[in-house]
Image (cartoon, grey):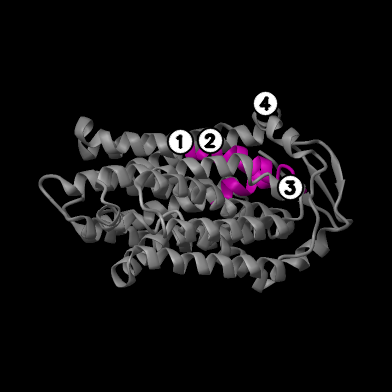
């Protein structure tokens, strides 16, 4: 795991690279991230991330409008995560090579255009193509977290990252809630136009609020893309972070996917609206990301990760046996989300610290593997309830969290 020691002379020694890097510019970069700028990063990350989700609650309405089936519209919306993975691989590294405010302004503008175009689609296959592009450009959220890690400075990196990650978490929650409400109020096409206008406004703000800095890497764009697989070979910190992060994100997605299946079947037979209310438990995760960033800067990433995984593991174990009590289930989900979101902020801070001057390609490499783990977890959770029952699904999730903790404990 990377360990950084910030000295009075402005020199940082990284045990991962074994190199001395003069950080005379560090104070200037830290000053560039004033409070309003950090809040902007969080807001922009929230909006970019939210753009993937607003159509999910309106699948039936969209299907009726397009004269298509709900299955076809659901398949079109599934293109969003695929596009997001493409964006992580192809777009996020751009903020290392070129001025971040120009890259992010252009990406958020493209997101606004595509969201607006989506409001005019007339077929499910065109919807799928647009959602694919929305997913790709919504990776601006990951680009913003990379910029936060680069410009915040070593002493505040995890704190600032926690605020930006809280924005991303809020975007996941708000995208579904606002999307459903606006679709019911003004229709899904007008709802998308509102989101497009918001994205355009936040894109223009990037040129005004983000610090004027150049790219932090001299490595060419295509060279950076080719180098990403090799980063896992060269950097033990990246391998460690990816291994444990993938394990607990598998557990996170398995719990949430399995929960929907378990509550929709016997003996509960909850409607989709009632199941969706459990997503409000994610508010605990938003609070945890903010707190965990501060604790990581003070206590170190390892301690925060282990604390978060312990909390999440206990909550997941209890979840396996309390679905009959909505109140207890909601509390356990809140603690489960809080624990894993806290661990994620601490874990990601170690990735961004590997190369503070050009963290985006490391962030991309980490997030690609992280989301692949989540995709496997979603597929497993949806099917495991039928195979193992809900208690068995929860036990597998606990085992995955325990694996992440064991990897952390075993690492020096």
Q: Can see residue 331? A: yes
**Residue 233 numbered tag:** 4
- Is 111 in front, or is 354? 111
Please report whichever mark, 2 or 4, sits nearer to the chain's N-terminal start. 4
Q: Is residue 348 magenta?
A: yes
Residue 305 shown left or right of residue 174 in the figure: right
Disc 4 crowd, CA 10 A, few/some/many (<14, 14-19, 20+): few
The stretch of residues the image draws in magenta is 345-373
Q: Can see residue 408? A: no
Residue drawn at (38%, 37%) of the image: 377
Residue identifier under label 2: 369
Q: Is residue 282 magenta?
A: no
* Residue 299 in picture, x, y percent from top left: 61, 54
Residue identifier under label 3: 96
Say which quarter of the image contains residue 212. bottom right
Q: Secondary structure at mark 2?
A: helix
Residue drawn at (47%, 35%) of the image: 372
Disc 3 crowd, CA 10 A, few/some/many (<14, 14-19, 20+): many
* Residue 234 in picture, x, y percent from top left: 71, 28
Image: 261 above or below 240: below
Q: Secondary structure at mark 1?
A: helix
Disc 2 crowd, CA 10 A, few/some/many (<14, 14-19, 20+): some
User: Which is the main secondary structure of the residues drawn in magenta?
Assistant: helix
Task: Answer whether labels 2 and 4 touch (C-beta < 8 Å).
Answer: no
**Residue at mark 2 to residue at mark 4: CA–CA distance:** 14 Å
Residue drawn at (30%, 43%) of the image: 72
**Residue 373 numbered tag:** 1
């Amino acid at each position: 795991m990377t360990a950084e020691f910030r000295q009075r002379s402005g020199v940082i020694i990284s045990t991962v690279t074994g190199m001395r890097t003069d950080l005379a510019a560090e104070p200037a970069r830290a000053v560039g991230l004033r409070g309003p700028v950090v809040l902007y990063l969080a807001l922009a990350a929230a909006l970019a991330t939210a753009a993937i989700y607003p159509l999910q609650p309106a699948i039936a309405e969209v299907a009726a409008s397009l004269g298509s089936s709900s299955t076809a519209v659901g398949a079109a919306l599934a293109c969003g995560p695929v596009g997001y993975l493409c964006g992580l691989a192809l777009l996020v590294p751009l903020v290392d090579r070129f001025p971040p405010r120009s890259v992010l302004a252009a990406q958020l503008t493209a997101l606004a255009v595509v969201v607006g175009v989506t409001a005019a689609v007339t077929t499910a296959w065109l919807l799928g193509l647009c959602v694919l592009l929305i997913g790709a450009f919504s990776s601006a959220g990951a680009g913003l977290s990379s910029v936060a890690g680069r410009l915040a400075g070593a002493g505040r990196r995890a704190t600032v990252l926690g605020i930006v990650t809280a924005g991303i978490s809020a975007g996941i929650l708000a995208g579904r809630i606002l999307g459903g409400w606006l679709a019911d109020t003004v229709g899904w096409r007008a709802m998308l136009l509102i989101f497009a206008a918001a994205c355009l406004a936040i894109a223009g703000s990037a040129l005004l609020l983000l610090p004027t800095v150049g790219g932090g890497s001299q490595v060419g764009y295509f060279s950076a893309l080719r180098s990403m697989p090799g980063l896992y070979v060269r950097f033990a910190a990246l391998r460690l972070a990816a291994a444990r992060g993938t394990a607990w994100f598998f557990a996170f997605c398995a719990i949430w996917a399995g929960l929907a299946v378990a509550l929709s079947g016997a003996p509960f037979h909850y409607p989709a609206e009632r199941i969706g209310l459990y997503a409000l438990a994610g508010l605990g995760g938003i609070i945890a990301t903010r707190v965990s960033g501060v604790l990581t800067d003070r206590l170190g990433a390892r301690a925060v990760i282990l604390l978060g995984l312990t909390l999440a593991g206990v909550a997941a174990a209890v979840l396996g046996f309390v679905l009959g009590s909505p109140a207890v289930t909601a509390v356990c989900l809140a603690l489960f989300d809080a624990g894993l979101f806290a661990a994620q902020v601490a874990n990601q801070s170690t990735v961004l610290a590997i190369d503070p001057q050009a963290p985006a390609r490391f962030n991309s490499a980490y997030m690609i593997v992280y989301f692949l783990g989540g995709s496997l977890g979603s597929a497993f959770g949806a099917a495991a309830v039928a195979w193992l029952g809900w208690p068995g699904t929860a036990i597998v999730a606990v085992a995955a969290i325990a694996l992440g903790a064991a990897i952390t404990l075993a690492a020096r």
